Image (tube, rainbow, N blue to C red):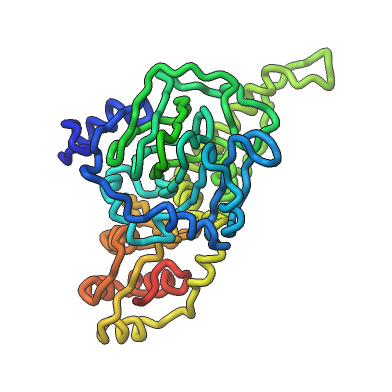
Amino acid sequence: MSDFFNTGLTQQQFLDEYWQKKPLLIRQAFVDFESPISPEDLAGLACEPEIESRLIEENGQDGPWQVTQGPFSEDDFARLPATNWTMLVQDVDKHLPDLQHILEPFHFIPDWRRDDLMISYAPEHGTVGPHTDGYDVFLLQALGARRWQIGDIPLIDAPIIAGLDVQILTEFTPDQTWDLQAGDMLYLPPHFAHHGVAMNDCMTYSIGFRAPSQVDMLDAVVNSMLEQGLGKMRYNDSDLKLSPHSAEIDAQAVARLKVMLHQAIDDAEPILASALGKFVTETKSSLSAIVEESFADLPTIDEVNRLFEQGDVLQRNLYCRFAWTANEVGGQLFLAGEAYPVSVKGIMHLARLTEQNELTITDWQQLKLDPQIATLLCQLIAEGGWFWL
């Protein structure tokens, strides 16, 4: 099994012993790492209107822990003090495809769980304060040094300072302190308190893995049930007993409701994978305009065949989220919150259509043997999931 960043752990051992359980410091996870982009490059991205970015100033002009949303201008950066601020840019892996190789070692974790590669820059003393996150994150030191203080136990619903635009813990007592140099990486499961402070000019790459909440998934399942005409069973109280209070909702009524809702979930079991697939592939609102620019006319199979034969290559759109699922009766491909059915025969092509970065004529020669899959690729091109180079 593959080694996990030269730690002596296999990837499965990391999942068994650390994933969503406890933090792990990995020295030189990326040996002799040099950031492919500079702080100036990152600042340039933060000036682009279609790119999500933030500035967090510990002592801002408008008060402590001031958060300013991008895009920014040269004047915004010129007014900043020498220390105690942080710039953060989201989805850099999508905006700069050359950084995709940094994500390759993380493919052993399902891609549909990964959110993005966020990159932060901070001068000396820059920090976003002690906080917790509700998701897994790998923090790769890319430039300079950062001191991380972390807690040893997860904190659920920890008190935060009121009245701020950033969530900062009211109290934080670290259990461990580590100084990370370029190439070092820290893994943190959800809800573990952490506080990172730049020791000099530093950049940190954050590879985050988000998970849907119960409320998120209940909403997604209900929507799928409505689409499929499920969940029509009504509340039943054939065991009703006399009660002295006509307006009381008693414990028995609540128990019946609980049984009713459990039954609804059981009835929805065949569509749960579909509900999850559509939810986790929805396009982030901050990226939707970029994805819409990739929409194309629906090509015919003959047109796709001609372009491949003349040497063109299809590139997977990194701004789009893909996933797939399969069972004994067929499969589904998910793109941007939509589900596309596939026959049992077509399941063998789903990984190729969702996980490869390029499709060449060699891939097409296999795909076009199944007319349903060839037609599906045409649909994916029209929806902006794949585009011609």
Q: Is residue 126 above or below residue 18?
A: below
Q: Position of residue 174 (x, y in %)?
A: 44, 18
Q: Position of residue 269 (x, y in %)?
A: 46, 42
Left or right of 352? Residue 291 is right
User: Which residue is found at the position 56% from the left and 65% from the top?
Assistant: 289
Q: For the C terminus, which image quadrant?
A: bottom left
Q: Position of residue 360 (x, y in %)?
A: 25, 73
Name the foreground residue: 132 vs 12: 132
Name the foreground residue: 289 vs 131: 131
Q: For the N terminus, which image quadrant?
A: top left
Name the foreground residue: 111 vs 196: 196
- Residue 369 is at least partly visible in this image: no
Residue 341 position by quadrant: bottom left
Q: Is residue 324 above or below residue 309?
A: above
Q: Is residue 337 above or below residue 159?
A: below
Q: Position of residue 235 (x, y in %)?
A: 67, 33
User: Which residue is found at the position 59% from the left and 59% from the top?
Assistant: 73
- Residue 49 is at least partly visible in this image: yes
User: Which residue is found at the position 25% from the left and 82% from the top?
Assistant: 311
User: Which residue is found at the position 47% from the left and 25% from the top?
Assistant: 193
Q: Is residue 205 above or below residue 381?
A: above
Q: How many marks?
A: 0
